[in-house]
Amino acid sequence: MFPKVPDYHKPNKPLIPNGLGVIYVLISATYLLLLHYFVYDISSSWASRALTLAVCILFGGFMGLLDDWIDLKWRYKAFLPLIASVPLITLAKTLGLRTSITLPIIGSLQFGNYYYFLLIPLIVTITTNTINQLGGLNGLETVCPAIVLIGLLTVSSGNATLLYVPLIMWLILAFFNVKGKIFVGNSGSFAIGMTVAAFAIISDVKSVLIISILPYIFNSSLILLTFFFSRKKANVYFDGKKLSSSHRRSLITLITYHRPLKEWQVVLTISLLVAFSTFVALLV
Amino acid sequence: MGIRKTLSKEVIVTNFKKIGKLRVEISHSSMLTFSVLTLILLVAFMIRIFPLRWEIETGSLHLSEFDPYHQYRFTEFILKNGFDFWNWQYKNWIDYRSWYPQGVNVLKKSYMGLPLTAAFFYQIISWLGVQIPLMNFCALFPAIMGAFACLAIFFLGKDVGGTPVGFLSALFLALSPSYLQRTSVGFFDDESIGIVALLFFIVFFLRSVEENRSLNSKIKYALGAGATLGYFCIGWGAALYPIGVTAIFVFVLILLNRYTRHLLLSYSLTLGLGLFIAISEPKLSTPYLLTFAILPIAAIFALLYFIEIFSNLKSPKWKLVSLVVLTGIFIGGFALLWQLGYIRGLAGKFISVLNPFVREGSPLVESVAEHRISSWSSIYFDLGIAIIFFVSGFFFILKNLNNRNLFLLIFGVTSLYFACSMVRLLVLFAPAFSLLASIGVIGILKPFITLLKEPPKIFAKKKYGLGSVGKEFSGTAIFLIFIILVTSFVVSPQAGGMPRVYSQAYSPVTITAASLPIVPSDPVREWLDMLDYLKSNFGSKPIHEKVVCSWWDYGYWISMVGNVTSLADNGTWNRTQIENIGFIFMASEELSVQMLKRYNAKYILVYATIDTNGNWFGAGDEGKWAWMARISGRNQGRNPSFDRFVYEEKIIDADSMWVDEKPFGNYTLGFDGVDKNKNGRIDRDETIPNSKGQNSTIFKLMNYARERWLEVNKNQPRSQVLQFFEEEFIAGLNRSAEDSYGGIIPLVCLYKINYPES
């Protein structure tokens, strides 16, 4: 049904359906629309949390679609999520959400109006792009965001309903992705990134988000700094059984630099890293 | 025999078949286009007549906001005096019913495009036997023009990107909240014809500069563009915008080395005819040609001629000579016109659009909500997440930067800038947004739709195009874009899930809502009752016997509907008079009556809104007093007339005069705030009376009405005493708390002025 692309990290490079993230986008958006009309008291709030999340997921899916189609340049990818931050700023202002972020050791940082016009766009842009950058292995782009989402869900009791169906849908996709049956594509990757960022802002759990995505930020920093200083990209080699790399320009290449690992081992290692950071985020 | 043969079965059947052949041949696609377009126009019209739900209950249609009443009066005048009115005896028609005592020269102060158009069509429908009151016709006119603009943008979109872009542009414009607001029932103002003229101007002008058209066709379209531009000029002051955009467009074409002789021809015909029509308008007349905004048109014109001459010169010597001569003419001409004072500065309003921060110094301009700078939220609130398609539109036109797309690029960027500098100009941005967003949507959809028709292949990324994608993927992508459009137009998150267009359209006209920021279930009668009272009690009196002083917002209502004489209105023709009215309201009663005497005012009118407990609500003059203070405060030290009433007439000494609203209460009118519990904010119980504020005329008049309502409806004693004013009529006085409009009681109060004996 979906377009098929070769899985380069499997022997014989079998063709796998790609772009199934679109299903996540459509089902999540539909669920959130229904939630808005049938569960929430529409008259109670002028700005709608469910619809705002739906719009952000749709926008993420749209961005991924554009990327799949015209291979967006990084400079566009970096700034396009700024558009998605507009509904979030509106919601945050309308609902009068906290304009501070509480971090361990540092304490509470009050940003005032800068929170709306600087912090929210930064959170959206960084989260979406870093999540999109950590992928390429079966399960990696689906399992790790799912861990972060579960972490966010546990501390956002009031808004947990918003994530029930999106999370279930994403876990189903993750199951098939881990088994090497499907790819979620850029539409899925950007959409889940947008979900994570938007949900954290809507539920006011920014500090949990920031700590949870530290492995992502580390990975993106490594990629960008390497590229900035040496103009070289990260590459991982597959010998038919294991993945290995001759450099340390990303999280994946860093893990496979010393000793070659099987694909599932790499995914497991990174997932454990993300699980650890999420656990730490929940503890603090 | 002949008859029998003629009536034979074969002949009759053959003749019937011939009749069948007479029917108009129309293709299936044309029929489909026509049907879809009709549907879009119907949607556009139906949405715009939503306010009728309240108007029908009042028994007649009313106009919205304030300016439309002036346009109505002008239309009425044309119908009464004929269409040749501006050439003959009415050249100096001074309306003394407004801006008393000097009145206002209507022809010199108003654009005649809208009244002329409305009068023309009203005359036609009258000849056809349709007899409806002019007010009803004027109220419906904007809705018709709104739908007509959708037709105009369809043609433009079709020219730019084909029929699908035309359809989408028309639909987007039909659903554009900012455009809808200014073309819904009752909004009988310049924009209703202005946007139509703008769109047809662009259609004709772009056709006239198309390269693959015959010369004959180019001339026809250039003349069409000139005529519509001229119509725009005599209809709306924003005509400077298309003129400026055209100048920039042609200048960029020159820079891109795309000059052709036909460009010179199109430009000359379009701007020549357009400006010729423009100067026939009494308000503009010939000095318009020497304004700072129009002169660049002449400069571009000269530049085009120079390029034409230059390209025909063979000798380098003559080329150099012509260059020197032209430069000399440019510099010399500009210096001469500057010295002679012919180059008039841009009108303040337009300067304030180009540079929004100028408005900070003008409370008169800034006090009007629609003149304020648009924030990012007002743009998002209007357009929703569809902004992404607008951005995509830019991407697609930049990919193919032909002449049409270049014009669209300039149109999009400049209209966005102007929309950001003034809320009102979101209406100018609406067509640009509709076009570019449509181009964006269609540009993104096109490859997916194409691929739906092809067999599925292996997916491969390709720059600026989808290599091969399965049909299902294309279908899903199309559905995703559809859902995004749905969230933008149907379930707008920024409007709490309600369609943004619906929340904009489903509200009564201003007068029927008494300017309240609510959607009442029934018409709010108070203003209508007051205007009925004025009309029936004072309407027949001579002009000088029925002078009513009110804040300028209500000037058009009381003079046009109430048929009394007003001192100021939304025309804001006389700044000093508005400042003096601000003084009347903010000064004490003793000082106020001295100023009122200068205008021979007989009555004074204020508008207050309270909740059912008697607290101020904020939708009446209790929300406007700060502007009254700021505007009148500007008078000090700047205006010679102020010096006159300070020193010669000794109304007030300079030390007692104010500059802004602060002396009247830093919390609200008549109250100062003191942070007693030191929590960093002023709570409701942390206020102390401010004597200057409580002694102001506006406070006393509003407070009197408030206490009267409490007296009538809650049996509470009244303490406010008026020295020189006497209650004449208070609309809303008998409205009980149970009958309030969502907890709001509007009080429109008319007081008779009793001047002191001396």
Image (tube, rainbow, N blue to C red):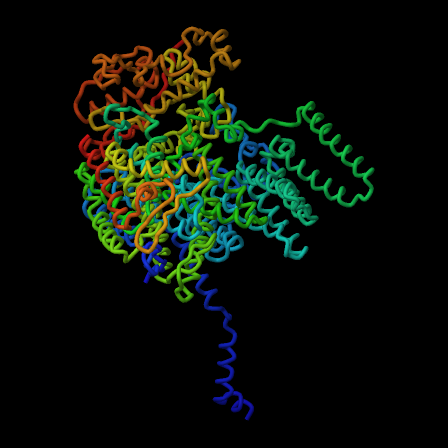
Measuring from the top left, give residue A111's x and y in whole percent: 31, 25
Quarter of the figure with the N terminus of chain A: bottom left
Measuring from the top left, give residue B197's x and y in whole percent: 53, 46
Q: Nearer the viewer, residue B442 or A229?
A: A229
Is A101 displayed left or right of B344 in the figure?
left
Q: Is residue B6 visible?
A: yes
Measuring from the top left, give residue B650's x and y in whole percent: 46, 7
Is A70 displayed left or right of B525 in the figure?
right
Is B89 displayed left or right of A74 in the figure?
right
* Farthest residue, direction front: A259
Q: Nearer the viewer, residue B261 or A146?
A: A146
Q: Nearer the viewer, residue A160 or B707?
A: A160
Measuring from the top left, give residue A207's x and y in whole percent: 25, 32
How many labels, in total? Answer: 0
Q: Is residue B87 visible?
A: no
Q: Please give the name of the residue rendered at 69% of the width and 41% of the height, measured from the top-left corner.
A: B304
Can you say whether B207 is above or below A83 in the image? below
Quarter of the figure with the C terminus of chain A: top left
* Farthest residue, direction bottom: B1
Is B172 displayed left or right of B21 in the figure?
left
Can you say whether B341 is above or below A238 in the image? above
Can you say whether A215 is above or below B38 in the image? above
Q: Nearer the viewer, residue B339 or A203?
A: A203
